[in-house]
Image: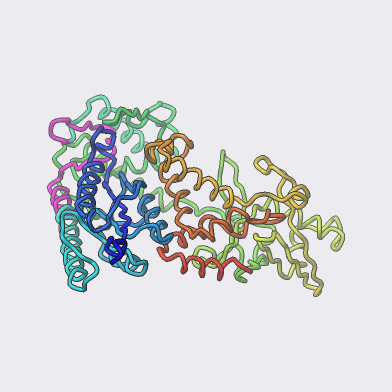
Amino acid sequence: MDILTELPNVVRCAIYTRKSTDEGLEQDFNTLQAQREAAEAYVLSQKQNGWHMLADSYDDGGFTGASLDRPALQQLLRDIEGRRVDCVVVYKVDRLSRSLLDFARLLSLFEKRGVSFVSVTQEFNTSTSLGRLTLHILLSFAQFEREMISERTRDKMSAARRKGQWLGGTPILGYDVDPQGGRLVVNAAEAERVREIFAISAGYASLAAAQQEIQARRLWTKDWTSKSGKHHAGRGFTQSRLAALLRNVIYIGQFCHKGVVYPGEQPAIVDRALWERVQHQLKADTRRRVPHAKVESLRSGVLYCAQCGERIWSTYSSRQGRRHLYYVCRKKKADAKCQQQPVAAIDLEPSLIEQLEPILGPDFDRAFLQHSLERITYDSRTREVGVALVDGSQFGYTLPLARRPGVRRSFEEQQAHGRVPRVSRLMALALRFQDLLSHATVRNHAQLAELGHVSRVRVCQILMLNNLAPAIQQSLLFLPKTARGRDRITERSLRGMAKLVDWDAQIQLFRSRFVG
């Protein structure tokens, strides 16, 4: 008999570890390393069956098990799709997932790719129906336990609120947090400031007038330092901050929880009669306020979205005391299929007037223009503007790119040279981030975020692009340059696609949306 036929098949084992928080990961020997040592010992015990460990590390430090959006897990799934893993080894079942639904999806993927699953501390064999049933029962009880813990925590916090206890949060002007018991204690200097603010507000009929007087007297918000040592300097009161302070029942010794007011443990620092007087004035001021004037736009009522056919409304944003008018599709928020982007009135209106002058003459006014236009359509993807006049004539033109700060190229330059799509640059950046992590150039996502001068959340968003199928990644890297309008493929449209575990499903969805 040939001795080679007696050798066991090689089983490539990937060890996956996870910890929900970052606490303790900086230690020389942390919980991720402890999980890995236990898993390595188990794999070595199965050496006679052909098991051996892969050199790649799949460690998720500081990521919850309630979601599959974890970088190391997604890398593991990509390796499974690439047929580079035969067995996944974890210390405990909940290290892989705490969600029964997600765990079932992972097991289905493992079974589809012929990958077995092993828990070191719990004897499971996913190759049998009884083993799968046992796993599902265990996860059901684990999920039930988590929900019960959450309910008990919420009930405890509600009970504490009903007793008037302080449960933490941003410190309040007039009080300090007792470091021994966590209760609110009166800060004498700040309490005097609060009483002065209430007295000023009671003497003015409007919130705006009171806010101006408070600003003139330089009465600032609370100046405090967090436990981590971050200093929060006092700032001037805006009308919204002032209204929130004046309506806070804490200052009369009460607490509000879910709309119900309860007696509080903290002493009152404002006389109840003064507080109620201020409340009456706030209500009267609210009734007296004139609603915001409607923004008058040059083409109100005739501008429509070329993508979904809905009306485009005018809105504005205020920056540095100036209003900036925009046109926004009415249906965009309700219908995710509409990809219409807002267009600034300062871009659309002058170009439209320039196009209409040869037709209507140079001396037309707003009223004449309103009665001359039948319909205007705009498509942000191509920046095409379509104009229909009441006499039945029609024409169209391409809206040039704005020549304002922040726009690097003119329309003619963009049309001649094009630009690399943003999603192509992000895909290359995601691969670079993954390369830095794989070669241990950076230890974790926190260092990567610091290196890239972005937040950790943004790092995770960019790394999600690595969850896309290799064929999609290749397509994104070699997209043609955008010659006009906005990029057709955006990062937001790819995030939902990246959450799909099955690469075949990703490719099918990508083709249905973008190919052709």
User: Where does residue 432 sit, x and y in percent of width and height?
Assistant: 50, 43
- What residue is shown at x 32% (from left), y 47% (from top)? 60
Name the one closer to the observer, 276 or 71.
Answer: 71
Q: Quadrant of the C terminus?
A: bottom right
Quadrant for residue 362, please give it. Answer: bottom right
Name the one closer to the observer, 515 or 171.
Answer: 515
- What residue is shown at x 35% (from left), y 33% (from top)? 200
Q: Quadrant of the N terminus?
A: bottom left
User: Where does residue 16 sit, x and y in percent of width and height?
Assistant: 29, 51
Q: Which residues are magenta?
A: 154-183
Judge whether residue 210 can be spotted in this image. Answer: no
Report the residue that reaches farthest toward the top: 189
Q: Name the chief secondary structure element in magenta.
A: loop
**287 lies left or right of 481:** left
User: Where does residue 275 sit, x and y in percent of width and height?
Assistant: 26, 41
**Residue 180 included in the magenta stretch of the image:** yes
Judge whether residue 4 can be spotted in this image. Answer: yes
